[in-house]
Amino acid sequence: MSTATSNSESSFDPRTPVIVGVGQFLNRVDQGADVLEPTDLIAEAVALADRDTGASLASKAKVVACVRMLSWNYQDPAALIAEKVGIEGAQTWYPDIGGNTPQMLLNRLATEISQGELDVGILCGGETWYTRSSLKRSGDRPDWTVQDLSVKPTWDGDEKFVMGHPAEHARAIVQPTQAYPMFETALMHSSGLAPTEYLQNVAEMWAGFSDVAAGNEYAWNRESFTASEIGTATDSNRYIGWPYTKHMVSNPQVEMASAVIVCSAQTAVDAGVPKDRWVFVHSGTDCKDRIMSERLDFDSSPSIRIGTESCLAAAGIGIEDVAHLDIYSCFPSAVGLFCAEMGIAPTSRPLTVYGGLCFAGGPWNNPVGHALASMVSTLRADAGSYGLVTANGGHVDKHSFGLFSTTPPDPSFQYDRPQEAVDATGGRAVLTEYEGDIAIETWTVMHDRENNPETYLGSCLTPSGDRVWASTTDAGAIAAALTEDIAGHEAHYKADGQITLT
């Protein structure tokens, strides 16, 4: 049984996980800064987080958890980072791809701390994609560290990355820029609003993210955009996947890294970390929806609803008690699903403390690393308030949540994985072979780089309620999709995925 440690305001379990240091580092190569290797970039962020603790705790870390990178194919980057910042004998964690992984890793670190298995851990991640893509365009390759294939991290995750279903792949539906817009058109239909009115609301919500990024010193793009500038397609703001313009999708062309140092409350006391650095991890939740083809519909997410409710219930609060939100924002539909499930009007309150993946920056799997660092700074400035961070990976199917406050949890940190409850909500069968009548469920239209519509993609439902995927160049279907809410419209479906509206 644990004994209580007291501070000036309250007592808490000495094993309670507490964030004591955060660091964010932007390397402005777009403004002439020297190029850094990804692990050097991340090591800079770790050093900043260590200084932020006021007590120098990084060297005591026994786990260095690194978010999966796409800029370079390291076998175990956490080992390189540990060496660069002077950490010896630490475990290294390097799970597979997913935007949910920063919060998932923090949940894992917090759980081990609360169970007495760990005293100090580091969560870190970063990307040098701006440099990597620039070199690729010129046919060059960076001279960065190459680890032997035999090098392995201590832990590389509990599951491997899977993106999509064979039925989706058969219609060449593989990219997030194809998938997320289809959640948006489903939300548009369920809103009951005319398409123009609904999309105006989406652009206004996104302008709110832009405003937050403009005030964030660690945002890659600090220009504030209006709803009109965001939602109107132009030569410089082309459609990426209708109804999304370039200003509505994640921006990976960044050079940025983040780090979070988390330890037990007793370790923070023993190290002399100033109390104004402390932000307690109250609760964490991980769960996942069915993959896109098999989910019941596109305008709900049982995982978001159940996962969020579980995370908040651990503190005995509701969403209305959370002062600060950072909702994962690779595309507007990810935010829209959260708002729909939690009963939030999207323009009624700030939905990010970071600024979002389009404006503040979307370093592939690590945006939430920056959201976490920003949330810690926000809560330090608003002592006693609650902050909720959400993260998702895949096509809005893998979800992680974290609740934080400068006030300690009562009685202690709690972790939940309510997967059984999520699975019980049911799904839908998907067909790979079908021809006959269907009803339109949801859709998007892909454009070329000159903003000319090319291909209609979408989900359709058979009379028995099974799902099939459509891919057509039919001019009538494309024209209707760009101007009307066509959900529920009847059509004829051919075996090759072509549809004709009836």
Image: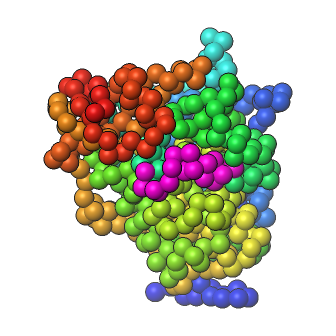
Whether residue 60 is in magenta: the answer is no
Q: Which residues are magenta?
A: 189-207
Q: Is residue 369 positioned above or below 265 on the image? A: above
Left or right? Give the position of 272 relative to 163: right
- Can residue 379 be seen in the rendering of this structure? yes
| Observer-nearest of 450 and 383 | 450
How many numbered dots are placed on residues in this image?
0
- Give the percent coordinates (x, y) of residue 291: 33, 46
Magenta span: helix, strand or loop, mainly? helix
The quarter of the picture where the C terminus appears is top left
| Observer-nearest of 270 and 448 | 448
Q: Identify which residue is drawn at 69% across, 54% down.
A: 208
| Observer-nearest of 297 and 15 | 297
Q: Is residue 471 positioned above or below 351 on the image? A: above
Dividing the picture into quadrants, the one containing residue 451 is top right
| Observer-nearest of 56 and 469 | 469
Q: Identify which residue is drawn at 45% across, 56% down.
A: 192
Tell which residue pokes out farthest to the right in this image.
32
